[in-house]
Each structure stands twice: as C-alpha cells, then as structure tokens.
Image (cartoon, rainbow, N blue to C red):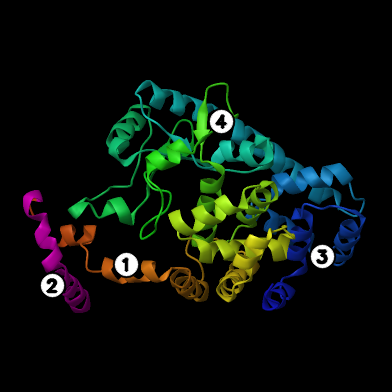
Amino acid sequence: MNNQLLIGWGSFPKELKLLLAFMKHEQDEMSLSNQRELSIDIDWDQFIQLVRHHRMSAIIYDRLKKVSPSWIPANVSKALYHDYHKNIFQMLHLSGEVECICKLLAEHQIRSLLLKGPTLAVDLYGDISLRTSKDLDILVNINELDQVNKLLLEQGYITDDIVLSALNGWKWRQHHITYFHPHKRIYLELHWRLNPGPSKEPSFDELWERKKINGLTSYPVYSLGEDDLFCYLVSHGARHGWFRLRWLADIDILMRRQTDWKSLTLVMKKEYQLTMIGGQALNLASKLLDTPLSKDMEIIANRSRAGYLARFALIFMKEAVDLHYNPPENIARYLKSYLYAIKSKRQKLIFFLNFCYPYPIDAQTLSLPKYIHFLYLPLRPILWVWRKARHVLT
C-alpha cells in the first residue's frame, strides 16, 4: 500500500484516531490497549461530536456495550446510549414506511429497489439499530417515474424539486427527486439512476435481474445485488468525499463477506467503470479500518491513482465538515478539485461536452414552445453570453 496515506493518517486528531480504532472489526486485547492509550488527554466532547458527525453512534455504542471499558466517562456512554435509542425509533418509523410504499408500488405493478435506509442496515448488520439513516432511497424505472410521482403526491408527500425538461437533459444530469411527508416527517428520495451523469451503470432491468430479497419486513422488499450494492456505495461515498466514515464502514463489511472477487472486479470494471474510485475505497478501508483484501483487490487498491484519490479524501474526514451545506470556502475549492479528479477520462470529456447541452436556466432565459426545443442547442452559447452580460450590467 501507499505509505503516503499513513502520513495523512498521522495528521488526524486523537479523537478521530480513537473513533477509527473503535470502528475496526477486530477488537482484541491489543486493540483495547491501543484505544486506552489514545484516550489519554482526549477531548471527549469533541469525540462525541465526531461520532455524531460520522453517523457512528449506534455501532460505537454497541461495541462499547460489549466490552464496557472503565476508562470511558459516564457522560460519553450516556450520550451514545441516547443516540442509539433515538436511532432505533427513527429506523422503526422508516421501516414501517418502507413496507407501505413498497406495497403501494407493487399494487400498481411498479418494481422498486431499496438503496439505503433500514434495508441496508438489515443487509449489512442484520439489525436496523446498528446503522443510522435520515431518509429512504427508492429506485424505479424511469419510464414509471411520472406514475410513482403521482402516487407519492396522493400519499401526502410534497416536493420542491421542479424538473424542467428542455431536451430532457434532467434524465441524465440528475438522478433523484427529494420528497417530504409533513405529517410523518419522512424524507424520501425517488431515484431513476443510481448516480448522476455522466456515469456508466446498468439499466434498471439489469439491476432487477440481480436483485436480492431483503428481510426487513414480512412483505417482500428488494434491494441491490451484492456486486451492484458495492459499486453503488463506492460511487456514493466517493462522490461525497467520504466525509462520513459510516460509508467506509459499509465498504468494510461488504469486503469481509465478499466471496466472488472475480465477479465483483468484472462488474466494477465493465458495467460501472469504477476501477479507479473502487481502488480509492479499498485503499481507504484497508488503511483506516484494516479491511482484508484479496490479491485481485490489492492490485486495484495499490494503483498509484487509487492512493492519490485516497489521500485527496482524507482532508474531508479530518475537517469533519458537512459538504452538503455551505462548507468553508477553502474546503469548497478543494472539493471542486477533488470532484474533477475522481472523474474518468470518459466522464471528463462528457463533463465538458455537457456545457454545450441546454440547461433549465436556458428555458428560463428564453421560453420556447416544446416543438422547437431543439433550438436551445445552437442558442445555448448566445444565451450564456446574454446572462453573463446582464449580470455584469446589474
């Protein structure tokens, strides 16, 4: 493995190092001794903040409960206990909604795949209490999107996401719509793609063929097959800079139970073109969580590009900043560079060509009848210049 990643790890604060030590699968006497040493002169309030930021309260509480180290302050154990039980009620609430929504869709002959939420907790941990989630993520066939949207609105869900369809660019630029149920206080993301474009991924029918039944509820609900789940979680974590360690913990579990390495390698390379960021995830997991890798996976993780992207992501873990909500300017600039760096050559080409394709703002600048929407293509440079000029003048 690339030793430079260890240099980045060395700059982590003690609180983050202790969190990572608790996250490791092997919890033997040597591990406990190392944790005890890391806890000396630690800022426990900062530690609790980090655990919550990385959404690891449930699993850390569960592991501490099993060993009950005497050197953990009572207020820390109490805080983790509170988070753990609060999460149980949240996950039970979401689980009930999963069953309701999946039944509703099935009654209308609509196939659906659960991506995260309680189904992922059951899949990875066998227990909804051991993984946190704030919303539901459901994938449907894009051809049934309008019908599902109508059903959700009839159920009381609302959305502020307005899809403007000039030349249908939204179909590949975006990948989900966010809904909120004001009475149930539940957020739901309706996906028609696993990831935003430009990215390569299997069709919904291909994903459905490889699906697996999930044991969350008595009613049959389905989630992604093993290889597709790994590729989805890798691309999701990479796209968000791995700023929550919970995502890396998911990868650790998947790798420990993986048996068909050749199948995973083939799917990752051919169907998703994720070898580069797959290597990043494996590099991070093996270094930070001691995740065991097969020889095939080690080759991918050992590539210089994988190590480079892994080191690139360490700053987001270290700074403990939520990249979704107005990160500091220096982190935002770093994130912009990072997001470009994780793109493949094909994605970078499409990224630049993407600017030539009309955006919804073009339709707002100049409204055209739908039957001549094709004119937005030649007009895009003119409309872009017009907006820039108007901005300067104002």
Residue 288, labelled with which disc? none
Single out the mark in the foreground, 3 or 4.
Answer: 4
- Magenta-highlighted residues: 370-394
The residue under label 2 is: 382
* Residue 95: mark: 4
Are dots 1 and 3 in contact, CB under 8 Å?
A: no
Give neighbour class at mark 4: few <14, some 14-19, many 20+ (Cα, 10 Å): some
Which comes before the other along the chain, label 4 or label 1? 4
Residue plotted at (18% across, 62% down): 362
The amino acid at mark 3 is Ile
Any mark on residue 42, and which? 3
Q: Residues under labels 3 and 4: Cα distance?
A: 37 Å
Amino acid type, callout 4: Ser
- Circle 2 SS class: helix
**Mark closer to the chain start, 1 or 3:** 3
Residue 177 location (% of width, % of height) = 37, 45
> Which residue corresponds to mark 1?
350
Residue type, numbered disc 1: Ile
Q: Quick one: quadrant of the C terminus?
A: bottom left
Marked residue nearer the N-terminal end (4 or 2): 4
Foreground mark, 4 or 1, reads: 1
Q: The disc labelled 2 sits on which kind of residue?
A: Ile
**Label 3 Cα crowd, 10 Å radius (few <14 / some 14-19 / many 20+):** some
Quadrant including the N terminus: bottom right
Alpha-carbon span between mark 4 and mark 2: 50 Å
State left or right for residue 22 relative to residue 256. right
CA distance separating discs 1 and 2? 21 Å
